Amino acid sequence: AQSVTQPDARVTVSEGASLQLRCKYSYSGTPYLFWYVQYQRQGLQLLLKYYSGDPVVQGVNGFEAEFSKSDSSFHLRKASVHWSDSAVYFCAASRTGGYKVVFGSGTRLLVSP
Amino acid sequence: NAGVIQTPRHKVTGKGQEATLWCEPISGHSAVFWYRQTIVQGLEFLTYFRNQAPIDDSGMPKERFSAQMPNQSHSTLKIQSTQPQDSAVYLCASSLPQNTLYFGAGTRLSVL
């Protein structure tokens, strides 16, 4: 079955530190991959997406993610986090050309001062 | 572009009452999705419309839940005889075909 796994339910980092949030997917072939962020009491906002090509994709607010076919992963990174990055981050995937987007369980990021 | 608009933001119903949730997709987007978000289950796909036609309702509970899209400017999710376990945040999203989902802020349904 198609699935997206985020193994870390909660991550705490200090402001200014680097960040990696992990995501593994289980899909036949190469799916479309996404990272969304949800701030408190708000809907989900797209950070970045991968369809094909360069495995490192750049997103908004200094975020980037790297696709790895061999590892079935799509980890999110940021070089230096800010307190305003505190939110819940969702990794998601859809079958190539498909419409149904499957979400991971989310990782709550807390940036401490 | 106001984004996807969901109303109300918060709805409180008594057990057994009906709840209707509204979604106005982004103008020009042909696809509309409904998701349910809870702490326990996370984000669950409910249903999908393309060009107003229902395409996939595989995530909808078979009883009490229904969704319509009577025109391209709005969709509704109706829950009859609400139960406490229906309490959740219901998220609507719209997109162009095979493209990024744009989410509304959600409707928080509380069933007392």
Image (cartoon, coloured by chain):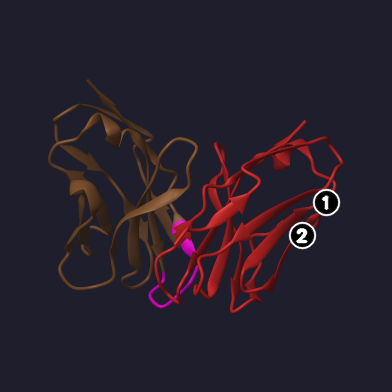
Q: Residue furthest top?
A: A113
Choose mark 1 or mark 2, whichever is in front: 1
Taking depth in this image into account, of B57 and A85 the one nearest to the observer is A85
Count of numbered circles on the image: 2
Taking depth in this image into account, of B66 and B51 the one nearest to the observer is B51
The residue indicated by pointer 1 is B80
Is residue A1 at all visible to an observer of this figure?
Answer: no
The residue indicated by pointer 2 is B62
Distance CA(mark 1)–CA(mark 2): 12 Å
Residue found 23% across the figure and 58% down from its top: A71
Q: Which residues are magenta?
A: A95-102
Element on which disc 2 rests: loop
**What is the letter of the red chain?**
B
- Looking at the rendered image, the quarter that the C terminus of chain A falls into is top left
Left or right placement of residue A52 versus residue B95 in this view: left
Label 1 amino acid?
Answer: Gln
Q: Residue B40: give x, y in percent of width and height.
A: 56, 38
**What is the letter of the brown chain?**
A
Q: Residue B105: give x, y in percent of width and height.
A: 52, 47
